[in-house]
Amino acid sequence: MVGAASDPMRVYASQSTGWFGQIIQRSDDGGQSWRPVGNEFAYDGTPGTHQWYDGTPHPWEFARVWHLEPSSDDPDTVFAGAEDASLFKSTDGGLTWSELAGLRTHSSGPEWQPGAGGMCVHTVLVDPTDSKRMHVAISAAGVFRSDDGGGTWRPTNRGLRSEGVPDPDAEVGHCVHRIARHPTRPDVLFMQKHWDVMRSDDGGDTWREVSGNLPSDFGFPIAVHAHEPDTVYVVPITSDSEHYPPEGKLRVYRSRAGGDEWEPLTRGLPQADCYVNVLRDAMAVDTLDPCGVYFGTTGGQVYASPDGGDSWEAIVRDLPRVLSVEVQALL
Amino acid sequence: MIRVVLPHHLRKLAGIGGEIELHVESPPTLRIVLDALEATYPMLRGTVRDPVTKRRRAFIRFFACEEDLSHESIDALLPEAVAHGSDPLYVVGAMAGG
């Protein structure tokens, strides 16, 4: 689910089930009412194959939309990151979608493999100062950048290192979980990778690790403070096979230095026997001052901090697994 | 006139309360009825069959007159009782998830 920055009343939601497939709904009144819009996501041309988990060729098949991203200045223009990894664009408020096929048909595409959750485009960032410049992140291919509005793409993963893959320094093949940036500083990107928290100062051309003193550098979401471009939030998770906070203590970690030095934020969060996860789309910041920070858990709680993370309160407790948290400032 | 019974979620998505009636050319086939269903309720496109391949979704079945029509040809004629509107065509979502 996502709200449009240019119109706080416009919200898009992606629903997907095994029964009825992909449904996209749109609200023009801040979520009070919804209507289904277009759900036809057709790959351009004849799709070839990518690699399956076992390395065998597997046909590209549209499965679902993982992430919606409206443009910063037009609520009717919205991008959809999909599984199998592909990017779609609508310019009519979601009624019709067309693929930006340059991503899927990148020369490395036949080598892409799915992450555990599927082979998905889960992050789409559009540079607010230059709408032709975009980044997407794919599990488990990595980050790709376009400088022509999504027509052509190149991998930007130099500096990423992933143990357990045949070439740990490969240009393509990293399981990036999420990338984020501050809108006033588009060249600085922060990344939560499968393992490692990373930072780029050159628009993704090169990356360096900034995990620093985190108790674990595995996790899913990453977010940047609305007014402090060097204040970053992550939620460390024990390991790739233990999706709960270290020691059962739910801690958001904040860096005010753009990484490397992290402080635990615990006030109001359970500090014993907590075994939830926080999914990659389930953290958001608002634009108020002080900045509000929000995240949802797989245990159905939504925590809010009105003071940049210093203190937290569960504003909802009994939802199903929270897949997505979005916040719109209506003031 | 063809009567069609949809599963709860699709009725909600289409904003309809109960059984629906579709006027289609005769003799009706499953393809003709599904085309009419999607033309009348565009929000249901892609929910019963894939919007690109037009294949029935794996968890969707078609029943009428106590018969499973899911594996019949989509161009086979529907039973007389459905064609005449005395029996409905059921679009059923699989009971799965438990």
Image (cartoon, rainbow, N blue to C red):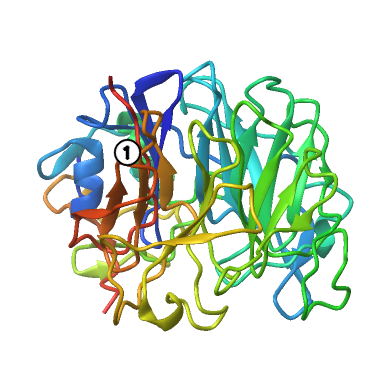
Label 1, residues with CA under 10 Å away: few <14, some 14-19, many ≥20: many
Say how many tags the image has: 1
Instruction: Inspect this view and state whether residue A138 appears.
Output: yes
Whether A187 is drawn above or below B69: the answer is above
Instruction: Indicate the position of residue B41 as horizontal and vertical percent values.
Output: 30, 33
Q: Quadrant of the C terminus of chain B?
A: bottom left
Q: Is residue A31 above or below residue A261?
A: above
Numbered disc 1: secondary structure: helix
* Residue nearest the observer in this picture, A327 or B74: A327
Please state which of residues B91 and B11 is positioned toward the viewer in this rendering: B11
Instruction: Answer yes or no: is residue A43 visible.
Output: no
Q: Which residue is mark 1?
A: B37
The residue under the point 29% across, 79% down is A272
Q: Residue at x 70, y 76 (%)?
A: A53
Where is residue A328 drawn, in percent x and y? 34, 30
Left/right of residue A32 with respect to residue A53 in the rendered view: left
**Is residue A92 depicted above or below B65 in this figure?**
above
The type of residue carrying mark 1 is Leu
- Residue in the foreground of this view, choosing between A21 and A29: A29
Taking the image as shown, residue A117 lies to the left or right of residue A207, namely: left
Q: Residue at x 78, y 61 (%)?
A: A49
Image quarter of residue A161: bottom right
Kindly identify the residue that appears in the image at 13 percent across and 45 percent down.
Answer: B19
Rendering coords of residue A297 (x, y %)? 34, 63
State left or right for residue A19 relative to residue B86.
right
Measured from the top left, where is residue A92 in percent x and y? Answer: 50, 19
